[in-house]
Image (spheres, rainbow, N blue to C red):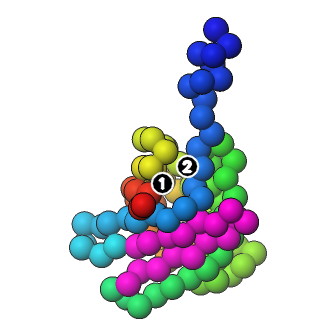
Amino acid sequence: MVCVVSCNSSKKDLVGKWEAHYSSGMSMTVDFKQDGSFEASIPAEHFTVGGQYKLDNDVASFTDTSCGKNYWGKYKLTFYNNDSVYSAVIEDSCSGRKNSADKATLVRTK
């Protein structure tokens, strides 16, 4: 019984490089670092932004340079597996970040 609970409850992790592709044909890359920082870029728009993130179970909070470093947004994460995650806004009135992160599926790159 102990193995069933502990073996199936693997901790989800964002650390690493991820990509999201949108129906518009654009894509975004995000590099989540171990120290709680991240860098995201949208190559088609020549746009790069950096910031901080926190992960608490299935809720991720983000702050970045485009919205203000003390302005956080919250997103519910649904991990399909360790290499694929869906993000849905809980609260974020920063429209640029919300447009990129709400209803986005990120896939870990190798």
Crowdedness near tag 1: few (<14), some (14–19) or many (≥20) residues, C-alpha within 10 Å:
many
The part of the chain drawn in magenta is: 28-43
- The residue that disc 2 covers is 76
Farthest residue in the front direction? 110
63 in the magenta segment: no
Q: Secondary structure at mark 1?
A: strand
**Residue at x-position 59% and y-position 59%:** 15
* Residue visible at 42% across and 61% down in the picture: 110
* Left or right of 50, for residue 47: left
Which residue is painted at 25% across and 66% down in the image? 23
Q: Amino acid at mark 1?
A: Ser
Q: CA distance from mark 2 to mark 1?
A: 6 Å
Q: Earlier in the sequence, mark 2 or mark 1?
A: 2
- What residue sits right under mark 1 in the picture? 87
- Examine the rendered structure and indicate whether residue 109 appears above or below residue 8: below
Q: Do the residues bearing badges 2 and 1 touch, measured as CB atoms within 8 Å?
A: yes
Residue at the spot 55% in from the left edge and 49% down from the top edge: 76
Q: Position of residue 55 (x, y in %)?
A: 67, 53
Among the 4 quarters of the image, the one containing residue 43: bottom left
Q: Is residue 98 above or below residue 59?
A: below
| Helix, strand or loop for disc 2 | strand
Examine the rendered structure and indicate whether residue 8 appears above or below residue 21. above
Q: Residue 29: x and y, percent?
A: 44, 72
Q: Is residue 81 left or right of residue 9?
A: left
- Is residue 34 shown in magenta? yes
Identify residue type, mark 2. Answer: Lys
